[in-house]
Amino acid sequence: MRGKTWTKKEMNYLYLNWGFFTIKQFAKKFNRTETAILIKAKRMKLGSPYKNISRFSARQVADIMGVDLHAVTDYWIKKCGLKSSKKPYRNRSFCLIEYDNLISWLEHNQDKWDSRRITKDIFLLKPLWLRAKKEKDNKLPKSRYKKWTHEEDNKLRFLYYKKKMNFYQISRILGRSFSGIEHRLLRLLKKDLVSINR
């Protein structure tokens, strides 16, 4: 008797995350047996499940750092110099980020992420700059790096477009970082342009 059919979403997830999680973790996520996971991986020619973790998908980085996926793909990579490469799969491609590139970027762009939001410890060593970063972040307003609300978006639009305030003034009012204000305004601009063109 055949098991349940694999969905495209499941296969994409398996493909992108193969080698990053254990067979047991995949089995639990998909509610399948470990044997079923291994068979599917073999048919997809994914190779050994025990390869060393040397790179992450953009989605994994977002999950690890506790940020929105678009913050990684549209801001960190496109605007802030986080090095990435493309991994083709079917008619799509996915962003991959080498471990060393990620750690280096985090060290040199400490104003763009919050150590309090990290969900998984990916630092093989505990550098002094990371300790200092954590101490600094613990003193920041709790609202910093939190998900933006609809009310905050409207207030941001009002302060920037109507009151003509600069990023520094707005950041003090909203309790957000300078880079956070800049990033959110870019997202809102794209969103507003799409609404206008519909």
Image: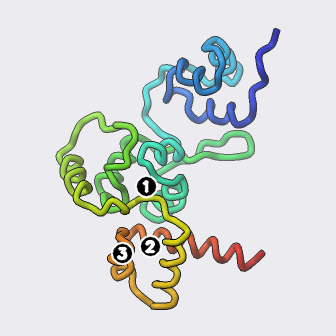
From the image, tell me which residue sits under label 1: 82
Residue 89, position in %: x, y? 68, 40
- Mark number for residue 171? 3
Instruction: Answer few, some or many: residues within 10 Å of disc 2's Cα (few below 14, many 20 plus, some between 14 and 19).
Output: some
From the image, tell me which residue sits under label 2: 182
As measured in the structure, the alpha-carbon distance from the residue carrying label 1 to the one carrying label 2 is 17 Å
Residue at image position (18%, 52%) is 132
Q: Are marks 2 and 3 in contact (CB under 8 Å)?
A: no
Q: Are marks 3 and 1 in contact (CB under 8 Å)?
A: no
For the residue pair 28 and 89, the one nearer the viewer reads as: 28
Instruction: Answer few, some or many: residues within 10 Å of disc 3's Cα (few below 14, many 20 plus, some between 14 and 19).
Output: some
Circle 3: element type: helix
Residue type highlighted by circle 1? Leu
| Residue lying furthest right | 1
Residue type highlighted by circle 3? Ser
Task: State left or right for residue 34 relative to residue 152.
Answer: right
Instruction: Answer few, some or many: residues within 10 Å of disc 1's Cα (few below 14, many 20 plus, some between 14 and 19).
Output: many
Answer with mark 2 or mark 3, whichever residue precedes in sequence. 3
